[in-house]
Each structure stands twice: as structure tokens, then as C-alpha cells.
Amino acid sequence: MKAKLILLGVTRHTVEEAMRFGAAVLVIDTPAFVSTLDLPAGSCALADADYLKRSPESIIAVARAAIGGADSCLTLTEVAMGLSAEVNALLGATDNSPDVVRDTIDKSLMRAKLDSIPQLRVPWFRLGCRDEFAALLREAREAYIVKPVAGVGSEFVKRYHNGDEPPVDGYPFLAERELLGRELSVEAFSQHGQHTIIGLTSTELGTKGDAGEFVAYGHVFPVSLDPAEACAVEGTVQAVLNALGVRHGLTHTEIILTDDGPKVLETHVRHGGGKIRELVQAALGIDMVRLALAARLGLDPATHLRPQHHRVAAVRFLQPAPGRVSAYSGVHRARYLPHVVQLEFPWHVGDEITTEEVLGDRPAFVIVAADTQQQVEEALTTVEEELELVVRQ
């Protein structure tokens, strides 16, 4: 009998992989995404621009009518995590509890939980209004990194010092004393509370003080640390996941390697963004989407956790100046350079490149993979030298 799976806010790759597992699926997503799907008999899609506002009961009712019920629900996008966990709780499916998911989405709740373990504590404040923000800045002797308590990615993340003006709106915010050091992220997979580290990713951020200083313009996976550092990072991630009660599925944990050891920025019950999923697949042959699907379908995930090869992969996001494209060249040639896995360049002559695209969506990028990090760095340099883009302000 086919497994029946609800998919919320997923990618085409997730839908296709669910089909390869032989599952009957109900995809609930926006009309724009659903219109791209061609599902076989026994599966169904519901186009709903406001699907995130649906109750878990209504989603289960739709599944019952469309595919005869559901065994479980899966999403790999942050905004649908809470709803998916609620659906699984009603279905009795194996998943992290809604409370655990809530504590990873709301970063102030996450910090409160982590405060129970001394090694995970960092100075932080939940700022509910402008007066509270101003009071913090008046007393601040060090910089604070401020972000929305339930923000995603680097959106609205900013550094504040004593004397700065607090924002007018957007509350509540989470303010954390700035942690100095190298930034890494850790991809992991959990099954019944046992956490397996898949690998560590290095992150290249924008120039300090620039508008895009908290935007990642590149990642390398896997990154190697000395044994003591690697052990400390892995131990920190294990402690974070245990403290938050994470027991199942993929996680993405962001770390700063400070002089006092690894400190946690935040964690998520999904794989990393910024093309990290693609880097893991290019470097190790591990498809984290298939891994998540196998676990959710009740299959043994061990096969999907086993590396097929060992390479180094990297992504570099292209960051042209905003303006109108007047000329470009080298895109076709660059796609066929050695070690290039994927190159996306969405603009044409006459297109307007916006700041929001460059710092937000980051639609132009190149992924490379090779046997060594030096080869990867050389491949990225060669691609960037091949590409030419002229933008008029």
C-alpha cells in the first residue's frame, strides 16, 4: 500500500523525489508553484496562496478527500514548519513537537531554553518596544546584533552601538551581544534523539559596515577544522539540539568560533539555505531531501546518510551593482569550464537589477566541485574572470 504524504511549501525536487519513493502526495502550495506540477494519478495538488493560514484539521480533511488520507506531512521551508508539525501531531506521525519547532523559530524562546546550559549562554535581550531598545543602547558598551525574533535569513539583521537610533517599527526584536570569530554552519540529521553530523560549512559574509554585511555571498562544504575544534563544534551542536528537544529530521545550526570556543547564533529544523543542500550533494552525494523523505515515510535513512564520494563544493553568489544591464558576456562559456556544477545568470540586456535581488534572492550564482579546496577556489576565480557584466546606473 502506498504511503500518503502531505507536502507543504516544498520545491519541485522534493515532489519528484517523493514520487520516486512511490508515495501518493498531496501538494499544498501557491498557485504559481502548483501550476508547474504534472502529478500522476493518485496524487493531487491544491493551489492556495494563503495555505499557511489553514488549520491543521483542514489540511488533513483535504488530504482525506484528495488522496484518501495521510500518514504524515513534510515541509523543508521555515515558514511552514510550525503548521507541518501541528499536522503531524494530529496524525500521530513521527516529528518534532509543535513546541520544539516554535522554540527554533522564535529566537527569544530558543535563547531562553539555551540559557539552561552555561556553555550555550550569550548576553541577549528581547526588545518589545522602542523604549526598551533605546534603554539597551544607552547602557551598551559593546555592539549588539539585532534581528526580528522570528526572522528568516539575514533580512532586517543590523549592528547597533551606543548612541544609535532604534527602529521605529518591526518589534519585537532579539538583541545579542556581537560574537567575534569565524562563522560556520553545521548540517545534521536526527533520528529518535540521536544526532548525526553531516558536515560543516564555512560562510563568507559581506564587508563589515556595508548594507550587505550579514548576507552570505559564498559557502564552502565541507570545511575541515583541527580535531579539537571539530570536537568542540560537534559537541556544541549536540548540546543545542538536546536542550531544545530536537529529536527528528534535518537541522541547520549556525556557529561562531570565538576565542572562548564555539557559540551558537541559531538553529533550524531544516537544511541550510544559500544552496547548502546542493553543496552537500555535490561534495558527498548525500541528498538531504531524500534523507528527510525517507525518514518521514518510515524508511531506514541510513542508506541516504552514507557518503557516495568525498569532494569539496562551493557556491559564490554574484553581486553586481544595481542598475540596468547594458551588456554581458561569458555566461555560456563559463557553464562548461572545469568543475562547474551549476551556473545561474537570470538577467538579459535591458533588465533592471535591484538591491533586493542582489542582497535578498541572490538569483545569480555558480556552484563548483572538485577534489581539493584549492581547485575549488581556482575554479571560482576562473568563472568570475570569464563573466563580464556592464550595468548602467
Image (cartoon, helix red, strand yellow):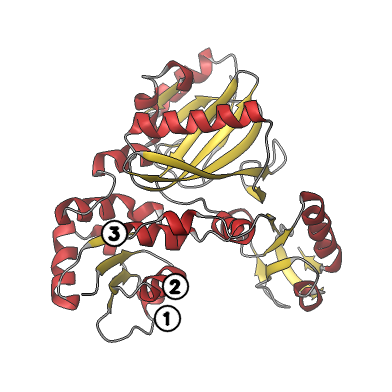
Q: Earlier in the sequence, mark 1 or mark 3?
A: 1
Identify residue for label 3: 298
Residue type at mark 1: give it.
Answer: Thr
Residue type at mark 2: give it.
Answer: Arg
Tell me whether the residue at label 1 lies in contact with that at label 2, contact meaning CB atoms closer than 8 angstroms: yes
Q: Residues within 10 Å of mark 3 (few under 14, many from 20)?
A: few
Q: Residues within 10 Å of mark 1 (few under 14, many from 20)?
A: few
- Mark 1 vs mark 3: give the one in front: 3
Q: Quadrant of the N terminus?
A: bottom left
Q: Which mark is residue 12?
A: 2
- Mark 1 vs mark 2: give the one in front: 2
Q: Is residue 16 left or right of residue 209?
A: left
- Between marks 1 and 2, how big is the CA–CA gap? 8 Å
Q: Is residue 269 above or below residue 13?
A: above
Residue 65 lies in quadrant: bottom left
Kindly state the secondary structure of the residue where label 3 is placed.
Answer: loop
Q: Is residue 268 left or right of residue 384?
A: left
Q: Is residue 276 left or right of residue 73?
A: right
Q: Which mark is residue 251?
A: none
- Between marks 3 and 2, how big is the CA–CA gap? 22 Å
Residue type at mark 3: give it.
Answer: Gly
Q: Position of residue 118 (x, y in %)?
A: 44, 16
Residue 128 in sight = no
Q: Quadrant of the C terminus?
A: bottom right
Q: Earlier in the sequence, mark 1 or mark 2?
A: 2
Q: Residue at x 40, y 52 (%)?
A: 78
Identify residue for label 1: 36
Q: Position of residue 245 (x, y in %)?
A: 31, 34
Residue 336 lies in quadrant: bottom right
Q: Position of residue 36 (x, y in %)?
A: 42, 81
Q: Is residue 98 above or below residue 11?
A: above
Q: Earlier in the sequence, mark 3 or mark 2?
A: 2
